[in-house]
Amino acid sequence: MAGDNRALLTEGVKRLGIDLETGGCDRLLVYLAELLKWNRRINLIARDTPAEEAIEIHFLDSLTLLPLLRQAEEPIHLLDVGTGAGFPGLVLACALPEARFTLMEPRQKRAGFLRHLIRTLGLTNTEVVADRIEPHAAAWCGRFSHITSRAVAEPGTFLPLVKPLTTPATRVILMLARAEAMVGVEQHASGPWRIVETVRLSLPFSGAPRLLAVACPG
């Protein structure tokens, strides 16, 4: 089974055109095993999700952000808002140990899982904040090079939430399932915003569409 999972993860990143080092793959397979074990006790992902499905819809989906981070010229410090079981932030931390990651998750049981996993994997580049974003907005302005979230999918909700944390250099990565969600982003009341890059892709096995849009304050 572990061999099958490795083969599936390796084939998935190959189809996505993503470079994943052996160490990153090893960490993600440990992550997967812990996720499925803990999921029997606390609600991390949908119950009875098979490993092969979790690899695609959680791990490979998260890894689609990796090329956007690797092209950054400045040191990377990514904030993942409402990370849940660590998607996409902890997946990216496993693959990109030279960068820094802050995972924001207000639910204590999920935060406990994340801290356990960080210790298990020996990650020194990742911290967990078990709180909501609003109390930290003023103090964290300009702290992060990148901000993202899978939990808050609609730009109309997410962009106003993170705007107080941004400077003109901040890149906000929107993870979307459909292009229609982009309508009106640049004219949103929390703006002005500029869309500086978009990436359209499909998940490698199901073909489910994805759109990544990189926004920055205008």
Image: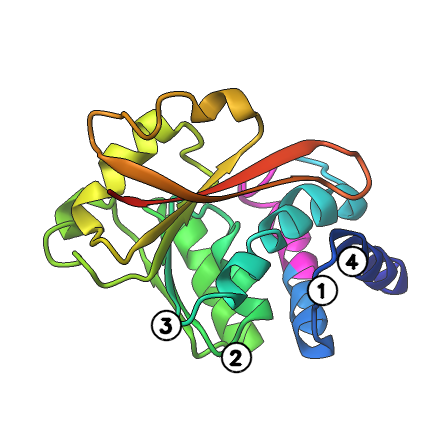
Question: Residue tagged by mark 1?
Answer: 29
Crowd around label 3: few <14 · some 14–19 · many ≥20 (10 Å):
few
- Determine which residue is flagged by label 3: 74
Query: Which amino acid does the dot numbered 3 rest on?
Result: Glu
- Earlier in the chain: of badge 1 and badge 4, it is 4
Residue type (three-letter) at the residue carrying disc 2:
Gly
What is the CA distance from the residue labelled 2 to the residue labelled 3?
Answer: 25 Å
> Residue sitting at 54 percent across and 71 percent down?
96
Camera-side mark, 3 or 4: 3
Q: Earlier in the sequence, mark 2 or mark 4?
A: 4
Distance in Å between CA atoms under marks 2 and 4 = 21 Å
| Label 4: how many Cα within 10 Å (few below 14, some 14–19, many 20+) | many
Placement of 84 over or under 1, stated as above or below: above
Under mark 4, the amino acid is Leu
Residue corresponding to mark 2: 122
Q: Residue at x 45, y 66 (%)?
A: 72
- Mark 3 lies on a secondary structure that is loop
Q: Amino acid at mark 1?
A: Leu
Q: Residues within 10 Å of mark 2 (few under 14, many from 20)?
A: few
Q: Earlier in the sequence, mark 1 or mark 2?
A: 1
> Label 1: few (<14), some or many (≥20) within 10 Å?
some
Residue at the disc numbered 4 = 9
